[in-house]
Image (cartoon, rainbow, N blue to C red):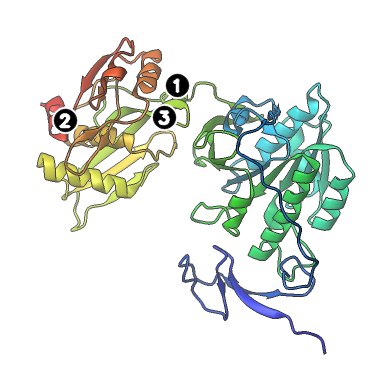
Amino acid sequence: MAKKDNKQYVCQNCGSVYPKWQGKCDACGEWNCIEEEIIGGEGFSNFNSKRSKGRVIEFVPLSGAQEHLSRLSTGIKELDRVSGGGLVAGSVILVGGDPGIGKSTLLLQACAKIADSPNGKEVYYISGEEAIDQVRLRAKRLGLEQSPVKLASSTEIKDIVTTLEKSNAAVVVIDSIQTMYLDEVESTPGSVTQVRACSYELIKLAKRKGFTLFLVGHVTKQGAIAGPRVLEHMVDTVLYFEGERGHHFRILRAVKNRYGATDEIGVFEMQDQGLVEVENPSALFLAERQGNISGSCVFAGVEGSRPVLVEIQALVSPTSYASPKRAVVGWDSNRLSMVLAVLEARCGMNLSSQDIYLNIAGGLRISEPAADLAVAMAVISSLTNKPLPADMVIFGEIGLSGEIRAVSQPSLRLKEANKLGFASAITPPTHAKEKKSRVDINIYEIGNVQRLINWFN
């Protein structure tokens, strides 16, 4: 009698497994995301079959000769910067982002530049979402139709693995991993089991053959890469492509990188001919800034190893409702609530009867707490209707007791501000070694939020 396949119910959002179907996933809180999947048989997930006894693994000391990592340049400096200086042979890079943000465009441009390089590397672009003619139309629009990139359209993992086994590929792009299908796994493409199984087969091949593998991943409505969370642990590098549809630039951010720094960013501008690198992001973010306007200030931030100056805008207006509105774009709304609570408790400001709107101009998303002081200054400026000096930058973290805390790399922030012509800065108290940095800029150190009011009297 044939053995009956076991069934399990898997959340397609986070990968949690349940013995029976239920409407809501207890792990991630999503509704109608649990689907039935069959396990067992001769598929990828069958670990119960009998096999020969394993061999003893060999241990080595921590000291020893280290192999130098050779890197392949993509021809796109911003992409090389985010990846840690270039592509490492045998590495796997997962690229995620909203639909239409430019993931396929960026990777197609990188493939063309690598294929056109004097090294003559073989580059394979395998699309599971688009037909070959659709990819050719994009290449023609970008002016890349003459590049020697090997193009194919397939979703069957077995066919892809067999083809790549016989190739001398240096770079392979899979667009996207959610469309790939392994017939030994009895579930639909894009399911947690399929994504995990297909990724495993491709990653294993990339490590053995030594080519760089790009996996394009869809994102959920919360902005996380769809599929099992284990996928991000399996790859070497995770890149998120960010940007607002209404803005003309895009941010490529590294959130994981085994061969380089994390939180590094690359800035691109979307134009008719594709994505163009931006060498000076601060000048781009401040290009449309108008000085001497209340509620506006310039924040000197650091993204990875790169200093970035960006305009923070705040608008405070009386509310006609019992609960005032808080609208935030580009920053953490919970962080804004904390800053407003500190201003009310420590400075005696009445903000509970005001609607407050906060915007990071240009669409950049800021996550570091060093923006607290700039946000507070923008809110106070809008509330008092008194503008801050147009040539001033601000940074600092605010504590719950009202103190202004020091932030990392203040000298790097000040040097970037000085380079762009800013004459003054409001900063937290710095250490003696930081004060020795020679910067032609007037620095005003503030240790408590109560002193912020003095700038508007």
Q: Secondary structure at mark 1?
A: helix
Which numbered disc flags the more N-terminal residue, 3 or 2? 3
- Measured in 3D between alpha carbons, the distance from the residue under mark 3 to the one under mark 1, in whole angstroms, is 15 Å
Q: Nearer the viewer, residue 140 or 104?
A: 104
At label 2, counting other C-alpha atoms closer than 10 Å, the crowd grade (few under 14, some 14-19, many 20 or more) is some
Q: Secondary structure at mark 2?
A: helix
Quarter location, residue 289: top left
Quick check: 170 above or below 9? above
Q: Amino acid at mark 1?
A: Ala
Q: Nearer the viewer, residue 169 or 29?
A: 169
Q: Which residue is mark 3?
A: 302
Quick check: 242 above or below 6? above
Residue 218: tell me if it is visible.
no
Query: In the image, residue 309 lies at what x, y percent?
Result: 39, 26
Q: Which residue is mark 1?
A: 283
- Looking at the image, which residue is at 33% across and 38% down? 369
Along the horizontal axis of the image, is 288 left or right of 268? left
For discs 3 and 2, the disc positioned in front in the rendered view:
3
- Measured in 3D between alpha carbons, the distance from the residue under mark 2 to the one under mark 1, in whole angstroms, is 27 Å
- Looking at the image, which residue is at 50% across and 21% down? 280
Along the horizontal axis of the image, is 220 left or right of 294? right
Query: In the image, residue 217 lies at what x, y percent?
Result: 63, 50
- Looking at the image, which residue is at 81% across and 24% down? 119
